[in-house]
Image: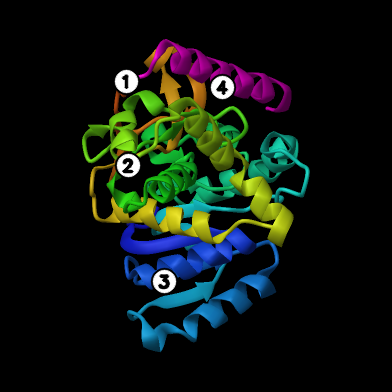
């Protein structure tokens, strides 16, 4: 096995999400080498060329199309390959289709690279993260999904809009499935350390239940709304991929709600879903126990059960 290049990334899948992620990663300056891999080699070549032509405005970098042997020395392998979500289709409808695709992709990656980090972005991300961990044989800390990082960003954005404040000052997260059974963890939400409801009242908002329900619904339906209007979502997730890669490459120990296999936390076992975790150079370095109400805890277990049912049918 080749020694890893700390500043090399591989992007597997050059659809909307893969190519937008590749562009965001080029802009980030995190990497000096990026290989794009797609079943349609010409598409990968076209994307590599297109992005490369902007390099005079960015940091020096080598960007090229390749095949699986080129992942051998990549520190991070971003897997976006899979069938896209169609209008009216839930993320879970995609399961069987995409597990089939993963059965051909993941063993190929593992054949050439055993030491890198596998970042799963394809949907349904929780099921595919679990599948990738089992199919690759990688240690679980080095296989995780983008999870609810984007959903959490959507929640912070909407709360920022609601309160007319900088969304970066909002500390709140979406947990559970990246999909229809996701949970807004309101119990632990705050704005710069001030409990959310108290801050809402400072800003003249008093109908907490109504607002919370509305915002959580908007977060959950964001992807469906965007797909309906423009056919696919890709910029938000590309920026989420960039953020996760920053945490890995800079060994930031950032707390992000990535999807990883759970082992008894909150009574959840042997399924991948999103909970806040410390993310650094070795991947998921530990879970962060957040405060949940009984109702949120119950909803989290229901989310895990939903995913387990799907997994049982599909894998």
Q: CA distance from mark 4 to mark 3?
A: 35 Å
**Image disc number at residue 61:** none
Structural distance between the alpha carbons of marks 4 and 2: 33 Å
Question: How many residues crowd around disc 4 within 10 Å: few (fewer than 14), some, or many (20 or more)?
Answer: many
The quadrant the C terminus occupies is top right
Of badges 4 and 2, nearer the viewer stands 2
> Which is nearer the N-term, disc 3 or disc 2?
3
Q: Between residue 52 and residue 190, name the one nearer to us.
A: 190
What residue does disc 4 label? 303
Number of other residues with Cα within 10 Å of mark 1, as a class: few under 14, some 14 to 19, many 20 or more: few
Q: Which residues are magenta?
A: 292-315
Q: Residue at label 1?
A: 291
Q: Which residue is mark 3?
A: 26
Count neighbours of disc 2 (C-alpha within 10 A) and say few if under 14, some if 14 to 19, many if 20 or more. few
- Residue 178's image quarter? top right
Q: Check disc 2 and report its element: helix, strand or loop.
A: loop
Residue identifier under label 2: 203
The Cα atoms of the two marked residues, 1 and 3, are separated by 37 Å
Q: Give the Cα distance between marks 1 and 4.
A: 17 Å
Q: From what the image shows, is residue 33 above or below residue 235?
A: below
In reply to whether residue 296 is colored magenta, the answer given is: yes
Q: Is residue 265 above or below residue 240?
A: above
Q: Secondary structure at mark 3?
A: helix
Q: Position of residue 252 (x, y in %)?
A: 23, 49
Q: Which residue is situated farthest in the front direction here?
A: 204
Element marked by disc 1: loop
Q: Is residue 154 left or right of residue 254?
A: right
């Amino acid at each position: 096995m080749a020694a890893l290049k700390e500043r090399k990334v591989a992007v597997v899948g050059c659809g909307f999400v893969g190519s937008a992620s590749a562009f965001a990663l080029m802009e980030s300056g995190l990497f000096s080498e990026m290989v794009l891999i797609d079943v349609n080699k010409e598409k990968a070549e076209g994307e590599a060329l297109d992005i490369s032509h902007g390099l005079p405005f960015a940091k020096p970098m080598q960007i090229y199309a390749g095949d699986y042997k080129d992942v051998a020395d990549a520190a991070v392998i971003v897997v976006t390959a899979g069938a896209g979500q169609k209008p009216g289709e839930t993320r879970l409808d995609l399961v069987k289709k995409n597990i089939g695709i993963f059965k051909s992709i993941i063993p190929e990656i593992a054949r050439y690279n055993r030491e890198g980090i596998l970042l799963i972005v394809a949907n349904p991300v929780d099921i595919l993260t679990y599948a990738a961990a089992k199919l690759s044989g990688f240690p679980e800390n080095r296989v995780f999904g983008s999870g609810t990082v984007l959903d959490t960003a959507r929640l912070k954005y909407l709360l920022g809009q609601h309160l007319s404040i900088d969304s970066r000052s909002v500390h709140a997260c979406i947990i559970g499935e990246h999909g229809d059974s996701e949970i807004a963890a309101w119990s632990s939400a705050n704005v710069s350390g001030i409990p959310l409801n108290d801050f809402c009242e400072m800003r003249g908002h008093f109908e907490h239940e109504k607002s919370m329900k509305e915002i959580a619904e908007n977060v959950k339906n964001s992807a469906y709304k965007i797909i309906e209007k423009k056919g696919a979502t890709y910029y938000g997730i590309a920026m989420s991929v960039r953020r996760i890669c920053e945490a890995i490459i800079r060994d930031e120990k950032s707390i992000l709600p990535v999807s990883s296999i759970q082992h008894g936390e909150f009574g959840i076992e042997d399924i991948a879903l999103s909970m806040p975790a410390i993310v650094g150079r070795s991947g998921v370095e530990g879970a962060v126990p957040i405060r949940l109400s009984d109702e949120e805890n119950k909803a989290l277990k229901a989310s895990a059960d939903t995913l387990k049912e799907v997994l049982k049918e599909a894998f």
